[in-house]
Image (cartoon, coloured by chain):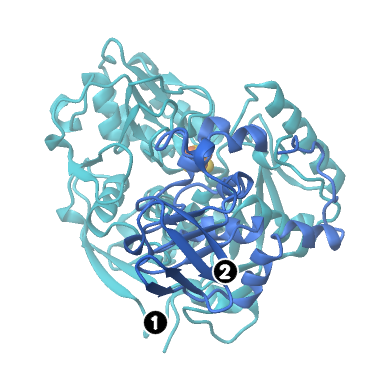
Amino acid sequence: MGMTIVEKIFARASGQKRVAPGDLAVVNVDVAVMLDSTFHPNSRRRILKLQDPEKIVVIYDHMVPAPDKLSAEGQAYGRAFVKKFGIKRFHDVGPDQGIGHAVIADRAYALPGGVLICADSHTCASGAFNCAARGVGSPDMLGAITTGKTWFKVAPTVRYDFHGKLKPGVSAKDVFLYLAGTYGHHTNQNVEFGGPALATLSINARRTLATMGAELSAEFATFEPDQILLDYVRERNSAPFEEQYPDADASYADRRRVDLDKLEVLVALPDSVIQNSVPVGQVGKVKIDQAFIGSCANGTLDDLAEAARVVNGKRVAPGVRFLVTPGTQATFIAALKAGYIQTLMEAGAVVTPATCGACFGGHMGVLGPNETCVTASTRNFKGRMGDPSARIFMASPATVAASAIAGHLIHADEIA
Amino acid sequence: MIRAKVWTFGDHINTDLMLPGDMLFASEEEQKRVVFRANRPGWVDEVRPGDIIVGGLNYGMGSSRPAARSLRNVGVGAVLADSINGLFFRNAVNFGLIALEVPGVRAAFEEGQTAEVSLEDMTVLNRASGVTLKALPIPKMLLDLMLSGGIYPHLEQQGYIEPNRDRPPPAP
Ligand code: SF4
């Protein structure tokens, strides 16, 4: 019996011929990404040895630029750490700044066939690059950077095969909302994406889907490699890699066909995305206070382009705060050059520097009591973006942008 | 053998509920005060050391934040759930919080009943109803880590991290 993509990666990384669901794989970690939270005075530990500084990337993203004294102190501590151990790949506040998973994508730090970990649940974002990437806890990170190893329980894999092509206006976020709405959670399962229509999904679209694998509660969310991916990686990173394809006789817990052309624009209702999606036309006239586009899932250039297309020449409804956070400063500049930022700002959007910011209710866009927000980010848990009484609807960047213009939840076609 | 009162929770209890985002960078002591603030205000004042949480499907879904540490600091003796999110489980192992996947456990207990957990047999008994359930096995390496207080003591002993925190949290 053959292996799935992550099983093949685990086998290589643990020096075994094969692994199967139920096994525990102790693997060598190729890349470990440390975030600013690692150095926060209330959570850090003093690290005495590193297994290999070359395998470490340090990215400041959750609280940047530092909004308070404790974050500032932690970030200064981290800079000293980076210097002490000679870590070369460091993304501080500045031109290289960005949300960790988006920076990893920009620079192709996650290599096909590799193992990448980070103490953040959306690390599965790098599964778009055919990488076994998963979020771990901060203690796992300490273990991995000091010993070079970590462990994974090998879970069964659900395979999704894409067919057809998305209709205009339907995005990768809608594909996710369809999967979460239809199939629910994937606890203790991996998901694997591929199929004949893979080439119709851009790298950015794949990133959105892989990132949202965390919201399916999947262990790993991994894409099959194709020429588009291999070209993307080779343009950005000269390091050697060995991409992994699933075996033809790989054993899957389930194999599901997704007809992209049949999908429509969806919205997840507040508090959960699990079996909670409805067509945007069916939510009724929900008035909003805030509309947010950003995060590691939806701060890509494609997302900003889509938002700009929708709001072009229009004006944000009075009383609505429309916040847009590009995933990285590099994406910000690209969007600036393409004219998207100007279009968004002329429509009334507030464009922030690249940061996690509003996505986790950290800073720059925290919700107050009883407010309603529609977000193109990763999570709509109760209290996620601020006050627990706030309601958070989740949708695609196009739907969020259109709702900012209308002042209530609406399909982008209806304001065109 | 762990024998304690049970608190029941539903499916998909997420880590934001156990450790709210705005408290992510607070001290452990402050974090301990806000467990289940949004869904069950006041719970931290009622729970007693050793009490057991019984959850439904996908317990601990969501963020990588050290929610397991907050439960341990509150004094939770064990988390039993129909299924446990993989990331929460990692944190439970690493912070030394006993967390077992016990299919059927949510339906087998009412709040306030007593659960008897045997780690030797990996079983859970509800003496009131007489129902015994089997927990899913945990690889030995991970169970040893979970029961020996998590990963920190090991990393300290091996000289990878400094034994003392840079800034110790106030004593509980
Ligand atoms: S953007 Fe949001 S989901 Fe992504 S890493 Fe930051 S806080 Fe987490």
Quick check: A317 above or below B144? above
CA distance separating discs 1 and 2? 19 Å
**Residue closest to the eye, B17 or A198:** B17
* Residue B71, percent from left and from top: 57, 48
Say which amino acid is labelled 1: Ala
The local secondary structure at tag 2 comes to: strand
Residue drawn at point x = 46 percent, y = 73 percent: B135
**Residue closest to the eye, A219 or A413:** A219
* Residue A280, percent from left and from top: 17, 37
- Circle 1: is it few (<14), some (14-19), or many (20+) Cα within 10 Å? few
Residue drawn at point x = 42 percent, y = 82 percent: A247
- The hue in which chain B appears in the rendered picture of the protein: blue
Chain containing mark 2? A
Q: Is residue A288 visible?
A: yes
Quick check: A121 above or below A404? below
Q: Is residue A219 visible?
A: no
Which residue is label 1 attached to? Answer: A250
